[in-house]
Each structure stands twice: as structure tokens, then as C-alpha cells.
Image: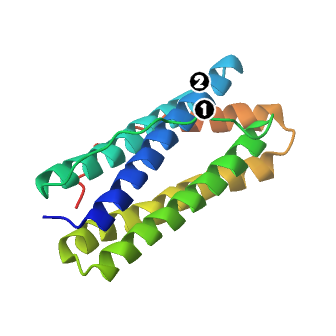
């Protein structure tokens, strides 16, 4: 059985993962409006990853006999009006998610829940990958500057990204 304190922390993080999915849907729509289909694809993969992260935590709570509480998801607001500014927002958001997963891991450690600590090790490693992935796109966008041809080349590259369902835990 999972402690109430840890259950509450997991439910809070599930909400944050579902918000991330929702935020990335909004960003996907932004890039659809710009007709940058590679960026649309990149965000579509992000949407699927965030959903998988939430489902992994939901399944974990259920497996441990906890109670999942789905909460209202706030309306996402995209910060920025250019691809560069949107990706700066993505990086800030992923850094925030990393801080929240680290806080969740702190709760698991505090209540001495080794199973949760093991699961959260996977999420911590995943966040390192998420931040690196976003950082790579962001670095390229900074190099591109106002070069529309280079932006279209990046768009083509981003179209190749595919979703691979994670094995969580």
C-alpha cells in the first residue's frame, strides 16, 4: 500500500503530466497554423510521450492500491510568438517538470518507499533526455535566426521524429 502523502504527490504529478500533454497540443496547433508540419510532428510525439508518462503513474498508483484522482487541467498559455520563443517556453516547462519529479522523488525518499524511488529513477532519467532533446532544437533555432530556408530545413528534420512507447520503470 502506498502512503497518503506519496499518493497525493503522485496525483499532483499526474495532473502536471496531463497539463504538459495539453500544453503541447496547444503548441502543435500553433505550428499547424504556421504550416510547419515537421514541428507539428515533433509536438505530436511530445503529446504521446506526456500521455504515456501520466498513464505510467496512473498504472503505478493502481498497482500499489492507491487512489487515482484526476483533477482539472488548467488552460495552457503559449509564451512567445516565434518558433524560438515557443521552444524557450518548452525548455522552461521541461525544467519545471524536472523540478516537480525531483520533489516527488524527495517525498518517496522521505516515506522510504523504495518501489516508488525505483520508478522515479526512470522518470528522472527521462527528464534528462527531454531537456537535452529540447535544448538541441533550441540551439538550432538560435543558430538559424531569421533564415527562413534554414527553418524549413529544420522543419523537414523534425518530421522524421517518431514516437516509441516507453517501458516505464
Q: Which residue is mark 1?
A: 75
* Residue at x 79% of width, y 36% of height: 82
Q: Residues within 10 Å of mark 2 (few under 14, many from 20)?
A: some
Q: Is residue 165 above or below residue 138?
A: above
* Residue 86 or residue 146, whichever sits in front: 86
Mark 2 lies on residue: 37
Q: Is residue 163 visible?
A: no
Q: Earlier in the sequence, mark 2 or mark 1?
A: 2
What is the secondary structure assignment of the residue under circle 1?
A: loop
Where's the N terminus, which quadrant? bottom left
Outermost residue toward the right in this view: 146
Q: Quadrant of the C terminus?
A: bottom left
Q: Is residue 144 left or right of residue 18?
A: right
Give the alpha-carbon distance from disc 2 to disc 1, as whole Å. Answer: 24 Å
x, y percentage for residue 154?
Answer: 65, 39
Q: Nearer the viewer, mark 2 or mark 1?
A: 1
Residue drawn 74% across and 36% down?
151
Q: Closer to the camera, 103 or 129? A: 103
Give the class, few, some or many, for how many residues have Cα within 10 Å of label 1's Cα (few <14, many ≥20).
Answer: few
* Left-right relation of 161 to 10: right
Q: What numbered label is drawn on residue 116?
A: none
Q: Are marks 2 and 1 in contact (CB under 8 Å)?
A: no
Q: Is 4 situated above or below 38?
A: below
Q: Is residue 155 left or right of residue 19?
A: right
Amino acid at each position: 500500500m502506498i502512503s497518503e502523502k506519496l499518493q497525493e504527490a503522485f496525483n499532483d504529478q499526474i495532473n502536471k503530466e496531463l497539463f504538459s500533454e495539453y500544453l503541447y497540443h496547444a503548441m502543435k496547433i500553433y505550428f499547424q497554423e504556421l504550416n510547419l508540419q515537421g514541428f507539428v510532428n515533433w509536438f505530436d510525439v511530445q503529446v504521446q510521450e506526456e500521455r504515456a508518462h501520466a498513464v505510467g503513474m496512473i498504472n503505478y498508483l493502481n498497482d500499489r492500491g492507491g487512489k487515482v484522482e484526476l483533477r482539472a487541467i488548467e488552460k495552457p498559455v503559449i509564451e512567445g510568438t516565434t518558433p524560438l520563443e515557443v521552444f524557450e517556453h518548452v525548455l522552461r516547462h521541461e525544467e519545471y517538470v524536472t523540478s516537480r519529479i525531483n520533489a516527488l522523488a524527495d517525498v518517496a525518499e522521505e516515506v522510504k518507499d523504495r518501489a516508488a524511488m525505483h520508478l522515479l529513477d526512470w522518470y528522472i532519467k527521462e527528464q534528462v533526455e527531454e531537456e537535452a532533446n529540447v535544448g538541441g532544437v533550441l540551439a538550432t533555432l538560435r543558430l538559424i535566426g531569421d533564415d527562413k530556408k534554414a527553418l524549413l530545413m529544420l522543419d523537414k528534420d523534425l518530421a522524421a521524429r517518431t514516437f516509441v512507447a516507453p517501458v516505464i520503470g
